[in-house]
Amino acid sequence: MARYTGAVCRQCRREGEKLFLKGERCYSDKCAMNRRSFAPGQHGQARKKNSEYGIQLRAKQKAKRYYGVLESQFAKYFEEAERQNGITGENLLKILESRLDNVVYRAGFAMSRKEARQLVLHRHFTVNGHTVNIPSYQVKAGDVIAVKSRDCEKIKECIEKNSARPLVSWMEAGDMAVTVKNLPERNEIDFNVEEHLIVELYSK
């Protein structure tokens, strides 16, 4: 399975904001954005004037990195969003939010999407009572995502650490489980991105 293996803190620095890719570290003083909030590389602190294409590319790269998907998969999600009724950019974000690894992270069962992806691959969760080990699995309204491995110390630790973090409005909490009440609308997604720029980029 293809995956990004480089330094994730560089990705946050390149996009100029926290993408919360490294779990607890992102909330501590050790976060790279707190110490070096400029782009990586020897020219990272130089002033750059972005072109229209550059601005659109940055929006796409930020979304791709935030949700932890690679280029080919992101392009497939965009094609799927285009085929659906409604606004393409909002459809794209809805598809990305509906990934099982993202739902596990949003539910507070993991400290980052990368960690959520690993827990899903290791068969720690069920969807409607059936074990699912595919991080890209698309959840639907009414699905119940539950912790299968209730004795897993890592998940227990994450639940305890995330207890103060409010649950997203489109989910309902249960006993080590969440129910997807509805797929999220744009105003229920807290990701700071101008999705119309991504649409413009792919429409060229």
Image (cartoon, rainbow, N blue to C red):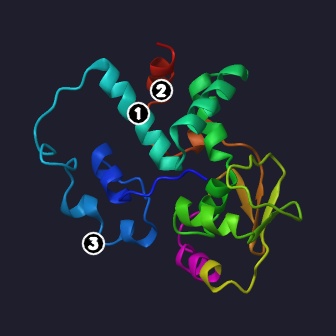
Answer with mark 3 or mark 2, whichever residue precedes in sequence: 3
Q: Secondary structure at mark 2?
A: helix
Badges 1 and 2: C-beta atoms under 8 Å apart? Answer: yes
Res. 148 image quadrant: bottom right
158 relative position to 61: left or right:
right
**Mark 1 or mark 3, earlier in chain:** 3
Question: Which of marks 2 and 1 precedes in the sequence?
Answer: 1
Q: Residue under circle 2? A: 198
Q: For the view shown, which residue lies furthest in the top direction?
A: 204
Q: Is residue 56 highlighted in magenta? A: no
Whole-number angstrom distance, CA of label 1 to CA of label 3: 26 Å
Tell me the kind of residue under disc 3: Asp
Q: Residue at x 78, y 75 (%)?
A: 175
Residue 165 placement, left or right of 14: right
Residue drawn at x 66%, y 42% as measured from the top left: 184
- Residue under pointer 1: 59
Three-letter code for the amino acid on which mark 2 is drawn? Ile
Would you name the residue on which mark 3 appears?
Answer: 29
Q: Where is 6 relative to 141, above or below?
A: below
